[in-house]
Amino acid sequence: MWSFFGGSSNGGTKGKELPKKAIVELREHINLLTKKQSHLQTQLITQENEARRFLSLGNKTLAKNALKKKKVYENQLGKLDGQIDSLEQQLFSIESANLNLETLRAMKQGSKAMKAIHTGMDIDKVDETMDDIREQVELGEEISDAISRPMYSGMNDVDEDELDEELDMLAQEETAQQIGIIPTTTETMKSNADTNKITSERVSELPNVPIDKISQSPQHNEEEEEEDEDERALRELQAEMGL
C-alpha cells in the first residue's frame, strides 16, 4: 500500500500523483453514474404514468408492458445505487489514506528538522548555556546598579553626630525665640533699620566736601591736613555704613 501511494523510493513523481489521479477518476465516474441514476428515475415515472394511461383506456396489455419496463429500470437503478455506494466508499478510503500519507510525510519532515536542530546538542550543553545566561543577567544587573549609584558621594561622608548637634542648637534657638529670650528675626531687622537711619542722619549733618580746586596759599599745608582728616573721617563713617 505504501508503494501504491507513492511511498516507495522507486515510485517517483508518478507514484505521488497516483492517489490524486484515482480520486479525480472516481469522482468523475460517480458523477456519471449519478446522471444515469437521475435518467432511470425519470424513466420509472414515465412508465408508471404510461401504465396508468393505458389502464384508463382499457388496454391492459400495454399497461403491463409499461409496468415491465418500469421493473427493468428499477433493477438497473438498484444496481447503480450499489455501484455509487461502492465508489463513494472507495473514494473516501483513498482520500483518507492520501491524507494520512501527507500527514505522515509532514511529520517525517518535521522529525528531520528537529533532528537537524538538535544535532550537536545535549542536556549538559543546554544546562551550561543556561548557566552562562544567568551569569550574564546577574552581571548586567550589577552593572546597572553600579551605573545608577551617585558619582559624588561627598554628602554621604558628613558626620551624622555633628548634624545632630547643629540641629539641636537650631531647635534651642527656636525655643528661645518663642519664649522671648533671643530676639526674633523681625526684631533684629527692625533694630538694624533704626541703626541705619541714625547713621544716615549723621552723614547728612556732615559738611559737604568741596569740589572746587583750592587756590595755593601760605596756609595750604594746614588746610590740606584738615581736609585729609575730614576725608579720613568720612571714609571711616562710610566703612561703618557698608557703603
Image (spheres, rainbow, N blue to C red):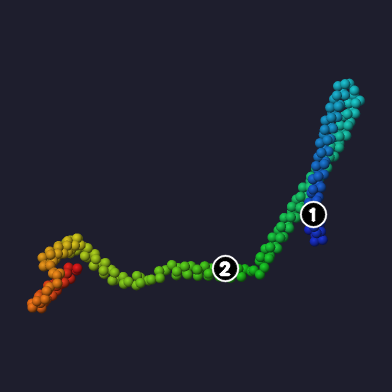
* Residue indicated by mark 1: 17
Q: Secondary structure at mark 2?
A: helix
What count of labels does the image hold? 2
Specify the amino acid type for callout 1: Glu
Mark 1 or 2: in front is 1
Q: Name which residue lies at 55% across and 68% down.
A: 133
Residue 58 location, x and y as percent? 89, 21
* Residue indicated by mark 2: 130
Q: Name which residue lies at 10% across and 78% down.
A: 221
* Image quadrant assignment for residue 181: bottom left
Q: Name which residue lies at 88% across and 32% down.
A: 69
Say if 188 sits above or below 102 in the image: below
Q: Name which residue lies at 11% across and 76% down.
A: 216
Q: Mark 1 and mark 2 in contact? Answer it, CB < 8 Å.
A: no
In-image side of 123 versus 240 (left or right): right
Visible residue check, residue 129: yes
In-image side of 236 versus 49 (left or right): left
Q: CA distance from mark 1 to mark 2?
A: 48 Å
